[in-house]
Image (spheres, rainbow, N blue to C red):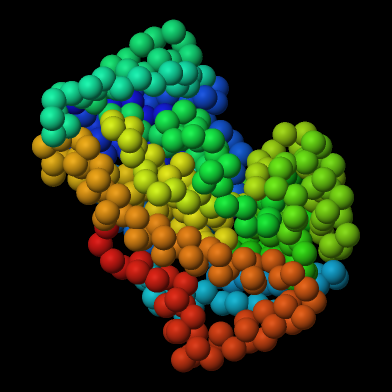
Amino acid sequence: MEAVVCGAGIAGLSAAHFLSANGWDVTVVERAAGPRPEGYMIDFFGPGWQAAGQMGITGRIRELGYRVDRVDYVDGTGRSAAHLGSESFTKMVGDRLTSILRPDLELAIREALPAAVQLHYGTTVTGIAARAGAAGGRGGKVDVALSDGRQLTADLLVGADGIHSEIRSKVFGPESAYFRFLGFHVGAYSFRDGHLQDVPDNRYVITDTHGEAMFFYRLRDGSISVLGVHRTEQVERPADIRQEFKTRYRKLGWLCPQALEHCPEEFYYDQVAQIRMPRWSSGRVVLLGDAAGAVSLLAGQGASLAMAGAYVLADELAAHADVPSALAAFEERWRPRVAEHQKAGESAAKWFVPRTRRALLLRRLFLRLIRVPGVSRLVSGAVVGRTGAAV
C-alpha cells in the first residue's frame, strides 16, 4: 500500500511514521524549502503522549522540552499581579507534560521517521484525481501530481498541510466554508538580548493586560521566546505584519518595547481560528490535524491531538480491509475528541486575553481561587479533560 502525505509538520510526520511502521510505502511532500524554524512554545500533554510512546520519542521530547514551574502575570513595571503554580496541574498528568517549541517537537518526530519514508521539501501537490475501484472501495487509487513534475499513484492521500490546507481547498472547497475566526491574531519569534534579565528560567511571564498580551519564556541557550496575542475584528492578516505587531504591543510597557526592537522582518504570524468540517474524507483523500479540525492555540493540545490522530488513522487502516471503511471508522472514533477540544478553545477565548479591564480583574480573582485545593482539582480536571483516555 502506498500513501502520499502532504505536509511535514507534526501531523504529517506522525502520519508518515505510523503508516510506514504498519508497512505502507510513504512519500511526504512539504512546500517549505526545509524544516520551519518559526514557532512558539506549547504545552505538550494529553493523548499525544501515548502516540509519542509508540514512536519511542518521549525521552527525546523531555530532553528538548522545558519545565515550567510557574506562570507570572506582570504589570507595566514587571511586578507580579497574579501567578499560577504548576503543582495542581502536574498532579493530574504526572510526568506526561513538558513545554516545548513546536520546531523541536517536529525535530523529535522527524528523527524517528523510519528510513523507508521519502521526505521531499520544496514540493507540494498540484493535482488530485481519483481512480474508480470495485464496489466496496477495493481497488481504487488516487493520482497525485507534484510541483516537481512527478506523477504518483497512491492508495491514500493524507492532507496534513495545516489550517490553510491546499489539499482541503482542492478536494472539499474554499477555506471560507470551514474557517471559524476566533477574534485573535498571534505572532511569535525568539531573540537574544543580554540586558533582559527579568525573564527567569522555568517560568512563563505574561503581561497582565487586556486586548493584547505578550508571553515570554527564557530558552536554555539564553535567548527569549516571545508570543504576542491580540484581539481584533479584522480577519485577514495585515499588509505589514511587523508594523502591526510593533504598534499593537509597544504600549504594554515592561520588556515589550525592548523585545519589539528585535522583531525580525519575517516571523510566525497568523489568525487564531478553528476548522469545522462536516466530513474529513472523500474517496482516498483524508484530512488530518489542523487541516481537518484545528482547535486553536486557545484550546491547547493541538500538537498532541495531531500526533494521536495520526496514530488512530494508521490503526484504523490496519484494522480494515478497504481504505474508505477505515477512513469512516477513523472519523467516527476521533471526531468526538477533536470536538471536545474545539469547544474548550471557544470557552478559553473569554479569558486567554481578556477583552476588558473588568474581565482582567475577574481573571486575577480566578487565579487566586485556583490555588484553593478543591477548586484547583476541579479546574485542572476541566483543563486536562480526558488526557488519560486511550486513543
Q: Describe residue 201's horizontal placement relative to residue 304 as left or right.
A: right
Q: Describe residue 210's horizontal placement relative to residue 376 as left or right.
A: right
Q: Describe residue 343's horizontal placement relative to residue 356 as left or right.
A: left
Percent across and percent down for residue 77 are 85, 70
Q: Quadrant of residue 183?
A: bottom right
- Which residue corresponds to the image point at 68% horizontal and 55% vertical from the top-left? 184
Q: Nearer the viewer, residue 131 or 159?
A: 131
Percent across and percent down for residue 38 are 61, 39
Q: Is residue 96 above or below residue 10?
A: below
Q: Quadrant of residue 146?
A: top left
- Which residue corresponds to the image point at 53% horizontal and 43% vertical from the top-left? 177
- Which residue corresponds to the image point at 36% horizontal and 67% vertical from the top-left? 387
Percent across and percent down for residue 201 are 63, 62
Percent across and percent down for residue 352 are 64, 67
Q: Nearer the viewer, residue 3 or 68?
A: 3
The total number of labels drawn is 0
- Which residue corresponds to the image point at 20% horizontal and 42% vertical from the top-left? 326
Residue 222 visible to the viewer: no
Q: Is residue 304 above or below residue 108?
A: below
Image quarter in which the N terminus is found? top left
> What residue occupies the far front of the structure in this picture?
135
Q: Quadrant of residue 152?
A: top left
Residue 328 visible to the viewer: yes
Q: Describe residue 144's horizontal placement relative to residue 139 as left or right.
A: right
Q: Nearer the viewer, residue 312 or 380?
A: 312
Image quarter in which the C terminus is found? bottom left
